[in-house]
Amino acid sequence: MNTQTGFRYGFYTFLGYTAYFLLMKLVGLVHIVELRAFNGAILGSGIWLAINHLIHHPSAKFDYYHGFRVGVITAFSGVIMFSIFMFFYLRIIDQAFLMQIKEQEAFGQYLNPYIIAVTLIIEGSFSGFIMTFAIMQFKKSKAGKFHA
């Protein structure tokens, strides 16, 4: 149950990432690095919803470990799917965007779709781990019980 919930909400997180990226690309704002901060809201929402699903699901076994696990699975699966999407997007669909990234970034000459995908996985995984920890601390009441 927990693993399925994590992958399901990870997929929703991936859809959120992808929709946001394509929207920013469509309106011409993809080059504004500061707008990537909204990715944190997408990731946090996916983790929050996955944990809430476990809390409210009557047959789900829920304790701190299971909540943390589903949050991490949600984050990792969503980030990995988005990284795979970005790899193919940069390698096949929009190589001009890759060139634009290379020109704008400090170490741009070293960037390629592989490095960008791995960087997204590392960055997103750490963010997801920290967000899961923060959400689980918030969900835990002072009595050690969880609330929605």
Image: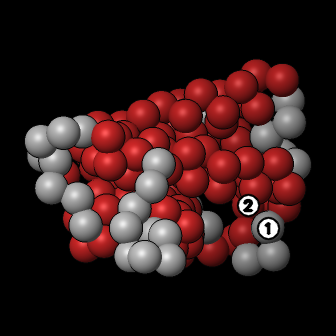
Across and down, in percent, residue 85 comes to 44, 41
Q: Dot 2 lies on which element? A: helix
**Disc number at residue 102?**
2
**Tags 1 and 2 touching, CB below 8 Å:** yes
- Which residue is identified by label 1? 105
Q: Seen in the image, is 100 located left or right of residue 123?
A: right
Quick check: can you spot residue 32? yes
Of the pair 105 and 127, the residue shown nearer to us: 127
Q: Residue at x 65, y 36 (%)?
A: 21
Across and down, in percent, residue 1 comes to 12, 46
- The 10 Å Cα crowd at callout 1, few under 14, some 14 to 19, many 20 or more, is few
Q: Tell me the amino acid under the disc marked 1.
A: Glu
Specify the quadrant of the image occupied by residue 67: bottom left
Residue 102 higher or lower than 97, as above or below: below
Specify the quadrant of the image occupied by residue 10: top left
Q: Seen in the image, is 101 located left or right of residue 126?
A: right
Q: Dot 1 lies on which element? A: loop
**Disc number at residue 141?**
none
Across and down, in percent, residue 134 comes to 55, 72
Across and down, in percent, residue 44 comes to 57, 53
- The 10 Å Cα crowd at callout 2, few under 14, some 14 to 19, many 20 or more, is some
Q: Residue furthest front?
A: 143
Q: Residue at x 40, y 62 (%)?
A: 146
Of the pair 22 and 74, the residue shown nearer to us: 74
Quick check: can you spot residue 91? no
Q: Tell me the amino acid under the disc marked 2.
A: Lys
